[in-house]
Image: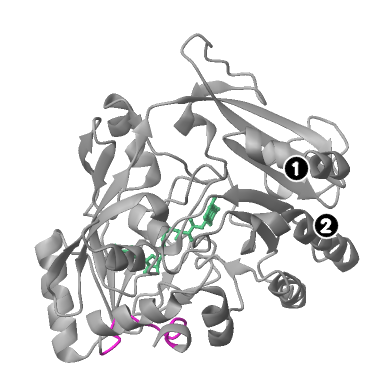
Amino acid sequence: MTTWTNWVGNQSFSPSSISAPRDEEEVAALVKQAADRGVGVRVAGAGHSFTPVVQTDGLLLDLSALTGVVHTDAVRKRATALPATRIRDFYEPLWEAGLALRNQGDIDTQQIAGAVATGTHGSGTRYTSLSGVVRGMRLVTATGEVRDIGEGDLDLLHAAQVSVGMLGVVTRLDLEVTDAYRLREQVGLRSWDDVMEHWDELVAQHRHFGFFWLPTEESGALYNLDGHGERLADQCYVKVYDEVGPDVPDDDTVGRRVDRCHRIFPMVYDPNFHELEYFVALERAPEALQAMRELMLASLPDSIYPLEVRTVGADDAFLSSQYRTDTVVISVSGTPGTDYWGYLRSVDALLAQFDARVHWGKLHFLTPERLHELYPRADEFIALRRELDPQGMFLNDHLRPLFA
Ligand SMILES: Cc1cc2nc3c(=O)[nH]c(=O)nc-3n(C[C@H](O)[C@H](O)[C@H](O)COP(=O)(O)OP(=O)(O)OC[C@H]3O[C@@H](n4cnc5c(N)ncnc54)[C@H](O)[C@@H]3O)c2cc1C
């Protein structure tokens, strides 16, 4: 029996079988056979979610053969890719076409279909998550039928943009991209009060603004953040990226690099943490952040991991954490193998007071009641899911209580 384990090692399970189809036709045949036998199906992406979103005791699909950017259109600003294309595999084909992803997150090893399925995002209110730039998708549904979803069927597209694999197997994605751009980074330590005082201008004036608040001196090393000898405890490690024109030369000086966008965005993480990430409406950000800092200081030593703070622009996806709302993103972590659930539950209780939505790929405590309160289109998502998959073959034990 084969066991599947995610990247960080906190989720593992044994599916009844694993198949690695070579193309969409094989995907459709496998889904059809599973449906005929009443077997559940889930797809494994790159395994970078912390939640049991891949788990199945049925058929697990490994789509790693379905990879590559298959089309770019510099006029319409579009790129079409197969589902297992890693974020980093977009860089060269897009750059050669004079294009780039509009925005991206802290790492680039996720598969595009996996990243889109959970609403993976970077930072900056001018840009949406990767799901928000999906303009079309091809899906193998529960009958084994191949269905093209596009802007002609906006409700279905908005349901499919963030679906956590519940509508079927994604075999192709059409993304809105942008002209290739270069970025200048500005990285430095600032005090909490300084960042809070300049919050509005930092959010409004930069393409990307985010920071890690470091509760203790040891916090930086946990995420490979180098303070270059400066005191770290209770400091904010601030990262700002802005676009520069062709007149600005490349620079490889750490902390103020200038380079192609895709060389500036990615960070390097060790698999030494489990993360919870919640999203609060941007206008409530300062109040929520202040409350989080107070909670973390009171909860030491459990909360020595940095508090990561970013922003993301609104979109229309039914299960998006940014559904029609610009948000601040608040992430906290704990050490694998230690009992820090009490701390995460207090973060959940605190941010619930701010009507926080969740990241589907990161630890959360969402209940069906909160789902319906916080996601105004959840009912419509569930209705479309039932229509496409009446037997619930794409649900699993983690998703069934919320979406059956
Ligand atoms: C170190 C680290 C850094 C991270 N940084 C960020 C960040 O900056 N921003 C952010 O938002 N998130 C971040 N994440 C979370 C991560 O981006 C998401 O969890 C993402 O979903 C992982 O993509 P994956 O390819 O690993 O997908 P998986 O975790 O393998 O799968 C995610 C979901 O997608 C489904 N799926 C995958 N492929 C398909 C398909 N073809 N058809 C249907 N369903 C499919 C899976 O079944 C599952 O439900 C980070 C995670 C880690 C571990």
The amino acid pointed to by label 1 is Trp
* Residue 353 sits in quarter: bottom right
**Residue 304 on the magenta segment:** no
Q: Which residue is mark 1?
A: 199
Query: Is the residue marked by circle 1 packed among few (<14), some (14-19), or many (20+) residues within 10 Å?
Result: some
Q: Which residues are magenta?
A: 391-400
**Residue 399 on the magenta segment:** yes
Give the residue at x 77% y 75%: 346
In what quadrant does ligand 1 lie?
bottom left
User: Total label count?
Assistant: 2
Q: Secondary structure at mark 2?
A: helix
* Residue 189 sits in quarter: top right
Tags 2 and 1 touching, CB below 8 Å: no
Tell me: is circle 1 under 8 Å from ligand 1.
no
Residue 193 position, x and y percent, is 87, 43
Closer to the camera, 59 or 239? 239
- The scheme the figure's colours follow is one colour
Residue 297 position, x and y percent, is 88, 61
Name the front one of labels 2 and 1.
1
Q: Is residue 85 above or below residue 181?
A: below
Q: Which residue is mark 2?
A: 290
Query: Is the residue marked by circle 2 packed among few (<14), some (14-19), or many (20+) residues within 10 Å?
Result: few
The amino acid pointed to by label 2 is Gln
Mark toward the start of the polypeptide (2 vs 1): 1
Residue 153 position, x and y percent, is 23, 63
Labelled disc at residue 115: none
Cα separation, mark 2 vs mark 1, equals 12 Å
Give the residue at x 42% y 86%: 400
